[in-house]
Amino acid sequence: MCGLAEKHLTSFCATACEGLSIGTGNKFLKCPRSILTKVAGELAKASGAQLLVSFEIQFTILDKKLRLVKSADRLENSFRATWLRRSMPRIKDEITEALLKCRVEIRQSYAESDSQLKIILAPLPVIEACDAFMLARETVRAIFEGEGVKATMSTKPLSTGPRNGSPMYVSLNGIDEKVSNSFVAGVLDRLPALCAFGMPHPDSYCRVEGGGVGEYVGWGTETNDLPIKKINPNQWEFRFFDATANIYLAAAATLASGLNGVHKAMKLSARDCSISLDSLTLAQLDDYGISEYMPKSLRESLRIVGEDSDMRKWLGDKLFDEYIGVKQAELAAFRELSGKEKRLECLRLF
């Protein structure tokens, strides 16, 4: 059921290409959703984990002139009694009710500032979680549009100001911590390549140097300075995702990398770094095993993933080649736009 239009239904489907079945017997070789289903099944079998996934949706509110909302109706300070006199409780309730009709639950929502909100969805099996992310994203945009303002998930809605991401939370329930660590070690091993899927837009990389992802490959307990955050022994936050991603493909590539870590019983080479990186020297970072930089551009991450033969094998030649080709074409087209055109295109799409 569609939460925004009660007489309509919303469905999520696999995509088949009839020509692919010739010689392969599989017409779903270019379908990210089908590949994610396959990888998730293989991970469950290899690790014994009960996999649950959820997503965080970060979005910025813009007025009709595409400027940050700056009004008396602030998004923050919801703990004050005056909150009840404002429009945001009604809007948040409307979003919550619309999503509940689609069986999508919001676990938490809060404001980062007077113009940026975050919504964290409840954990679900991975395919359902990706479907929920897509439903929630469009529901948020539609409801705010009805209020005469724009909710954008663009990573860089303005040259300065809030930066938006869509972190993925992964829970590997029912397994030993060593297996969970091997999964994360596999993800860390492929992290620069994974950016081509989780951060597939030129503007995505403002979150590397500008905060939100982190400049180094590494992990830490409850840290926002690195791209992987440990929440508890079997629960992790992967921060290298944003709303420009094909969420099914990005999740499939990430789970495939983690599966490789489980197969090889990889160990975490980097140490848990739970303190601010700003307080560490390069020598101290090296002691933590933190020395590799994250890609600083889509061009760089596409080059890295293009050389990754394992990723090609995990995702399949057909999908891998077509994805890289499309992203390279998008990158070339984006370079031809002016700064204003780039911003307007991102706001239109995301």
Image (cartoon, rainbow, N blue to C red):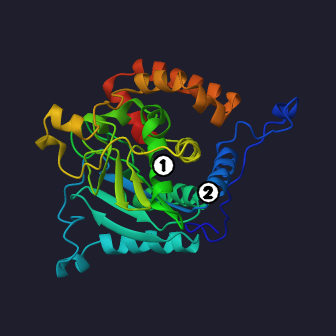
* Quarter the N terminus occupies: bottom right
- Point out the tag, 1 or 2, that comes first from the N-terminus: 2
| Amino acid residing under circle 1 | Ser
Q: Residues within 10 Å of mark 1 (few under 14, many from 20)?
A: many
Residue under label 1 = 182
Q: 96 left or right of 60? A: right
- What's the residue at 59%, 30% (across, down)? 310
Q: Secondary structure at mark 2?
A: helix
Q: Which of the 4 image quarters holds residue 73?
A: bottom left
Residue 21 percent coordinates (x, y): 85, 35
Q: Secondary structure at mark 1?
A: helix
Residue 220 percent coordinates (x, y): 29, 51
Residue under label 2 = 127
* Callout in the foreground (1, 2): 1
Would you say residue 199 is visible in this rendering?
no
Q: Residues within 10 Å of mark 2 (few under 14, many from 20)?
A: many
Q: 250 left or right of 43? A: left
Which label was assigned to residue 88?
none
Question: What's the distance in space between the residues labelled 1 and 2, CA to CA?
Answer: 22 Å
Above or below, 5 against 126 in this view is: below
* Viewer-closest of 39 and 288: 288
Residue 328 percent coordinates (x, y): 52, 21
Above or below, 291 against 8 in this view is: above
- What's the residue at 30%, 46% (across, down)? 271
Q: Are marks 1 and 2 in contact (CB under 8 Å)?
A: no
